[in-house]
Amino acid sequence: MFKTRRSRLWLFLLIGLVVLSFLRPKDEGSAYQEYFFALNQELKSNGFGKPVVLLDLDRLDENLSTLSKNIPPPLHYRIVVKSLPSLDLLRYITKATNTNRLMVFHSGDLVMLLGNPEFSSFDILLGKPMPVRALEDIYQKTKVDRFQKIHWLVDTETRMKQYLEFSKSKNIKLNLVLEIDIGLHRGGFVNPKETNQILSIFQNHQKYLEFGGFMGYEPHVASVPNLLGDKNEAIEKEIGYSLKKYERFVQSGKESFPSLFAKELLLNGGGSKTYRFYQKNQNVVNDVSVGSALVMPTDFDVSTLVEHKPAFFIAAPVLKRLEGTTIPFLESISFLFPLWNPNLQVTYFIYGGAYLAKKESPQGLFDNSLYGVSTNQGILNGSLATGLKPDDYVFFRPTQSEKVMAEMGEVVLLRKGKIIGTWKCFIN
């Protein structure tokens, strides 16, 4: 009986060890991929010793080529300024795509562009409705002729009437585009009956208001549920439904107010996640907006953008490397952490931190949840396989472009893996 009990004890112990081996975290670490190994060497030799945003112009060129292929004439490409917040970057893209169309979301950006001789004559569409007080502020800071060329966005009858009163008070004429809801449900006019009421206001106040067209945004289609079948086919089908709604707005307006539709109108749609579907099977939208797809933050890692390459990164220098992971007040047991979890074998303190980004290379680096995050000296843990030393760089992929570029203030340009200069970003 004693042998039987001992055998059972050993069996339970063996089972426990097996269970623990499955529960024990795996080593997630690995060294730089080839691309980032080369960038690390370049930054250590010719960089600035501080966190920077890197913009790979070769990858940007590939994304621009892909974009141009998917927006053929007669479609027009409109650059989303907020996602690419640098005059030099905008200049580069306008030349590469031969467009003079911009979508602007911030009043400060609008004032800056209207005050720049190069961009002041561009075709500018507002990407969101502005409070009438914003119009007053912009009007005071820019020239009247430039102000009147802007396509302002209107989403309600109340805002329409506010803009009309503003126009009358300044004795100017505003060009207004109507925001329509084609499935996103983020505001805008929901049916042609509503827009026809607005079109009657245009008809009756042509001295002060000019009808510019429609804007229908549909990023929701990229999230269409699809358990079985091809994801992109499901998205394309949903795009079709949205465009049928769009077409009903246009057709109803043409029938009720033909004089307002006698000229070519701006019929804007699309976005980074959906732009590629506008090149075929539709004759409604003539103006497609894209921004983030050109640099590919992680929020845009979707099936419709697999042809696009990540073109910008954050690079932050390693300041300190400590063996193991020692936690304040837990010093006496801290040696146990890496024994259990190999991803706690090394602690790195980096320059800066708490970036709006995901860790890219080396792989297998983690935030230390006990320490918390820091914007001054971020703490990262990893296994010995990550192999970083002080003055090496940790590379991140931003989750979005506009906030990261604006906060960092400039982008460092890369051509064939070498630093060739910098471009300033503008701050909203």
Image (tube, rainbow, N blue to C red):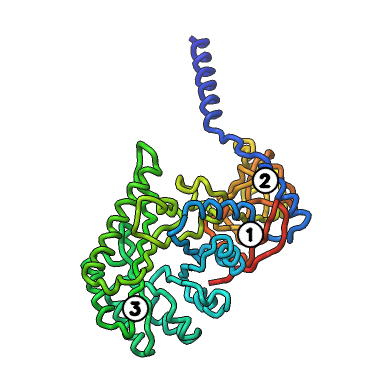
Using the rendered image of the protein, determine whether residue 239 is visible from the camera's viewpoint.
Answer: yes
Q: How many labels does the image show?
A: 3
Could you tell me the amino acid type at mark 3? Glu
Q: Quadrant of residue 86?
A: bottom right
Could you tell me the amino acid type at mark 2? Tyr
Q: How far apart are marks 2 and 1 (CA)?
A: 16 Å
Look at mark 1 in the image and give the residue it sits on: 53
The numbered disc on residue 34 is: none
Looking at marks 2 and 1 on the same chain, the residue that comes earlier in the sequence is marked by 2
Secondary structure beneath dot 1 equals: strand
Residue at 31 percent across and 71 percent down: it is 262
> Badge 1, how many Cα within 10 Å: few under 14, some, many 20+?
many
- Counting from the top left corner in percent of width and height, residue 158 is at 28, 77
In this view, the mark in front (1 or 3): 3
Residue at 45 percent across and 84 percent down: it is 139
> Badge 2, how many Cα within 10 Å: few under 14, some, many 20+?
few
- Counting from the top left corner in percent of width and height, residue 205 is at 28, 83
Q: How far apart are marks 2 and 3 (CA)?
A: 52 Å
From the viewer's perspective, is 188 left or right of 343?
left
From the viewer's perspective, is 123 left or right of 334?
left
Residue at 59 percent across and 47 percent down: it is 366
Residue 393 versus residue 291 in the image, above or below: above
Using the rendered image of the protein, determine whether residue 333 is visible from the camera's viewpoint.
Answer: no
- Counting from the top left corner in percent of width and height, residue 188 is at 31, 67
Could you tell me the amino acid type at mark 1? Val
Looking at marks 1 and 3 on the same chain, the residue that comes earlier in the sequence is marked by 1
The numbered disc on residue 35 is: 2
Secondary structure beneath dot 3 equals: strand
The numbered disc on residue 210 is: 3
Residue at 46 percent across and 70 percent down: it is 105
